[in-house]
Image: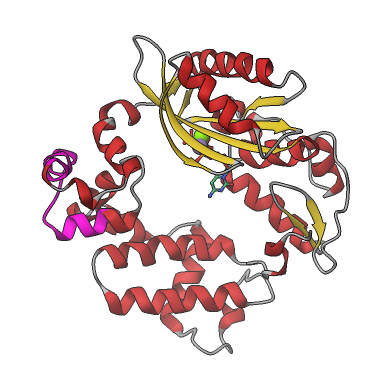
Amino acid sequence: PPDPSRIKSSNLNSHITDELEKLQKLYEILDDRGRSVTYANTIRSLKLLNFKVTDAEQLKKIKGFGIKTRNKVAEILQKGYLDKTVSLSKEPQIQAINEISQIYGFGSKTAIDLYKHGLRTIQDVKKFAEINRDYFSEIQLTGIELYDDLIQKIPREEVERIGSIIKAQLKLIEPKSEFELCGSYRRGRELCGDIDIVIGTKHKDRLLPFLITSLKAIGLLTHSFTNTSEKFTGVVKLEGKPHRQLDFFVCNIEETPYAILYFTGSSNYNRLLRLEAEKKGYHLSNTGLYNRSTGQKLINATTEDDIIRFLGFPILSLQERDV
Ligand code: DCP
Ligand code: MG
Ligand code: MN
């Protein structure tokens, strides 16, 4: 079936809207509804434009882009960021909310709500959670409980150790499956935020429960949460080491190169690739490369490079994707 997201028109101005979204979020956190709504409207208009803005003057004749907005756009085009975003980020209120939103399973909305309840630090959240367990989801309670572990970055050697244990269990279950450690690890980082694994299988709908059971049985997997047939997030732990966050993405074996490309990132690199695809009338997702108007699959790639080459994009080293 055609990928449903292909009909969604693409944003040609993410280089601007990403920065404006940061500022809009800050105003939202500061409870400045006026500015927050104004920026939300500006962002929506920019996303709908059918051309890429390279000069703020291009917006002069378009409704809703006054001089103040155009100045902000000009500043982003010139420097890549906004001074206002930098200065607001230093506000104590913002810092408190950002700290709280670092807890695994928390979004900025939860953090803002808790701030409004008077909570300022992780310690405050821990105390609050002891008497208000119902306020939180299972995953958030684990995030609070394991905060001191999960906030720590993972050395790449440990990612490798955990990866090889999981790979061995996977191969026992399905010898011909594909396994790849992706995310920041694959881009060569020395320290990683979590462990991202792509699994290609001929039994996409059945594999995951078997794998989860076996990882629990060997004592590696300590917590498991979302559990659809393709996405899984959980917590693993090696003896003597902190708890670590684990993400699985399970795909059909022939979709593996697309999934690996996507889950290797970085998010910024993915954005560049998607933009290139859209420019050519294609849609790139973590399952395939499609013709945007017909939904037809364009190539059957066997490697990531097949996809990148088809897009006419330069082949970068894995480290160079760490943008
Ligand atoms: N990804 C993406 N867009 C998102 C989230 C993820 O394109 N909104 C892709 C690119 C990421 C990859 O998934 O590189 C893995 O996501 P992570 O959040 O685990 O990010 P990283 O592994 O890159 O960094 P970290 O070391 O923080 O885990
Ligand atoms: Mg990661
Ligand atoms: Mn991840």
Q: Nearer the viewer, residue 318 or 173?
A: 173
- Residue 101 x/y as whole percent: 30, 47
- Residue 239 x/y as whole percent: 37, 10
Using residue 251 as the reference point, say whether residue 46 is left or right of it: left
Check the image and report above or below for 3 versus 188. below
- The residue at the point 31 percent across, 43 percent down is 140
- Please, what is the dominant secondary structure of the magenta stretch? helix
Using residue 82 as the reference point, say whether residue 77 is left or right of it: right
Quadrant of residue 182 within the rendered picture: top right
- Residue 319 x/y as whole percent: 63, 29
Using residue 298 as the reference point, say whether residue 16 is left or right of it: left
Check the image and report above or below for 48 versus 187. below
Name the image quarter holding the N terminus: bottom right
Specify whether residue 220 is in view: yes
Q: Which of 174 and 146 is in front in this view?
A: 174
Name the image quarter holding the C terminus: top right
Specify whether residue 56 is in view: no
- The residue at the point 60 percent across, 16 percent down is 169
The image's colour scheme reads: secondary structure
- The residue at the point 27 percent across, 40 percent down is 141
Q: Nearer the viewer, residue 181 or 234?
A: 234
The residue stretch that appears in magenta: 111-130
Is residue 51 within the magenta segment? no
Q: Which of 70 and 155 is in front in this view?
A: 155
